[in-house]
Amino acid sequence: MKINSYLRAITSPKDRTLFRYFLLAVLRVALVFVPQTGYIHPDEFFQTLEPMAGDEFHLEVVRPWEYNATFPIRSVVAPICVVKVPLNILKFINVYFVHFLGINLISSYTILIFPRLCMCLLSFVCDYSIFRMCRVYGLRHEIRLLVLGSSYVMLVFGTRTFSNSLEMILTSFLLCLVAECMLLSNTVIKQSELLQDKYKEATKVVERVKIFKLRSALPPHSFNRCFLIASLCVVGIFNRPTFLFFGMPIVFFWLLRGLGSRSITFLDFNVRVLLFILASLPALVICTLVDSLYFRYLTLEEIEKMEISIDNFVFTPLNFIRYNINPDNTAKHGIHAWYLHVLVNIPLLFNILGIVAIVSAFLFLFRFSRGEYSSLPRAQSILGLMTVATVTPTVFLSLINHQEPRFLIPVLLPIVMLHAPKLQSGFFRVNPFRERHILMDFFYERFLSAEASRNFLKVWYLVNIICTLFFGFLHQGGVLQLTNHFSKEIEARGNDVNIHLVTSHIYSVPMSVMKIPSSNLLYTNPVTGQKFRRAKRFFSYEYGSMSMKLLYSRLKIILDRSELKRLEKKQKYALFLAIPSSLTDHLNMAFYASNSTKMRHKQVKVFYPHLSTEAMPSAFVRHPCEVNTDFFEIDDTCSAYDEDQDPYSLDTLLRKFSSVIHQFGLVLYRIEMGKKTS
């Protein structure tokens, strides 16, 4: 009854909008604990979770090439803050749970969840930044918060341990700080000049003294938030040096405040630049020291003995730039056209809002070309700040030959600030074109008017729901379930069995969430005092998008080697293969084509849902009869698709539909020696 009465009390559109936003905020936190099984990109794990979890819990992990001590291009400052610190908190809490309740909290689930929870909580900095800027500038915050909260970028990317997600958070906070400083400076400068004019006009000494006191009481503004903004920029650059593209135009607006007025000159601009550089030095020194200590360029012993030289320091952002400035290096990760960000990645990330932003940019250029300067945002206004914060990084990132959608995540907040209300009210309430033309009128009525925007918000919701399900749960969704399965498998089998996992057509398997003790750590026997290392018991083989025929030969080699060790050294083993279920038929054909019974494959489990874009489901392959699932009953009498059968019959269509559905899975096989042939 109380809930119903509360819902009835929510009558105004603003209250309903805020209520929906708060539900979405709760959903963002809830999606962390579910957890999301979607696997967007290996960098989510291998640039943050893998090295930090390996260091904290002494686990068997795969350290990425970016953390190579000879030429590290990734700073550990951000991973320490968003991954290592939460894992330390988990470790601290676990001591009391084990002591008082006998419960061990450290598991594959908690190792994955705690860093994501930290990122989720930090993501609300973006929400606060939008709320703060809207309140300060008198803008509508309800619709902007709703659009931000319903974006799958916040629901999925914002809760993952991507360096791009942290870059988005830092950019949002920097925008908020600079926007507040701009408003303060504009207000103080305007009042100061007004009082100066009154001071000159005053004839009485008393009036002049009073005006002088009022002018002296104005708050300082020229160097406001200088240390915080400078430190924020340093941390952002150490997190990802591409932060230069996002932070540089924003900081330029901070430096430019009031320039052109009577009280602010180029001297003030130059002094701001100098103080900004000086204010950034403490954060620069701290971040450099952290990286140098982590990568063993510098040791505490050398600091104690003061045996320090320039060779004891590593500057990871410089290494990052040196690596990526070479087009041959970035080409190794994929070459893309310069227009990919604008035509593909922005619509993919921000759907209808991204299209609105692109159309607005073209309208901006159209008006500029026609000399309609009065309708353009002022250079030192909040609209000018958000426009530059959107366009500048997009242009610079488009000049790099390797482009991924996640690189543009930080422009979400300025796009929301600029264009979110247009999802409700349209681009313009009246026709903005000065010269009337039938094509311009048609364009306005169909795309720019308030009537045309009625379905914009519905499209926004629908696309974000689809993308949340796709990226949050479906895309490579079986990989994390696979790691959870093997964490239990390894614990159950003990240390006397070598486990071999072969994967194909899926992303790299993160080792940290399997919770395997490191084989590189030196242990001490508490009884004898003898030093020893654990033998490596888990072996992973990644074969990318290898053909099933070639994969069969690799499996045979691994199986023969393992069998030889079993016979010679009495070493037990278990060989597994994980592939998308869409390749089941191809794998079976590879086994049958070998004409050998020395090796056989037996299905262990299927993990749903899973979709590998490298192996898309197809309706024109044999029904995967061999795949047994927990969700679908399969007729054991099913056979290959009969080409003579009516392709439009109900039975055929249902069979194709069932076949496609069954291909959205990740199959785990046990590979064993078959019966010997004579």
Image (tube, rainbow, N blue to C red):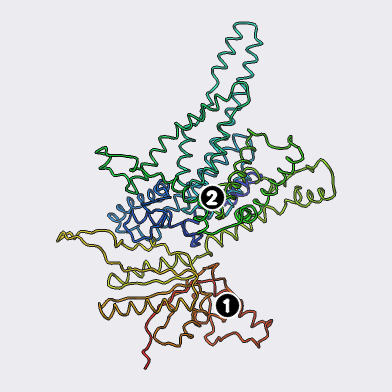
Placement of 189 over or under 37, stated as above or below: above
Where residue 242 sits in the image (x, y, percent)?
51, 46
Question: Which label sits in the foreground, 1 or 2?
Answer: 1
Extreme residue toward the top, this view = 204
Quarter assignment of residue 597:
bottom left
Of the two numbered discs 1 and 2 on the same chain, state the one appearing first in sequence.
2
Residue of label 2: 25
Compared to residue 243, the image places residue 559 above or below, namely below
Q: Is residue 75 left or right of residue 346?
A: left
Q: Nearer the viewer, residue 105 or 217?
A: 217
Is the residue marked by circle 2 packed among few (<14), some (14-19), or many (20+) residues within 10 Å?
A: many
Residue depicted at 37% across the width and 55% down the height: 53
Circle 1 residues within 10 Å: few <14, some 14–19, many ≥20: many
Foreground pick, 533 / 458? 533
Q: Residue at x 64, y 11 (%)?
A: 200
Q: Which mark is residue 463?
A: none
Quarter of the rendering containing residue 566: bottom left
Furthest residue toward bottom: 678
Q: Is residue 562 left or right of residue 132?
A: left
Q: Which residue is mark 1?
A: 659
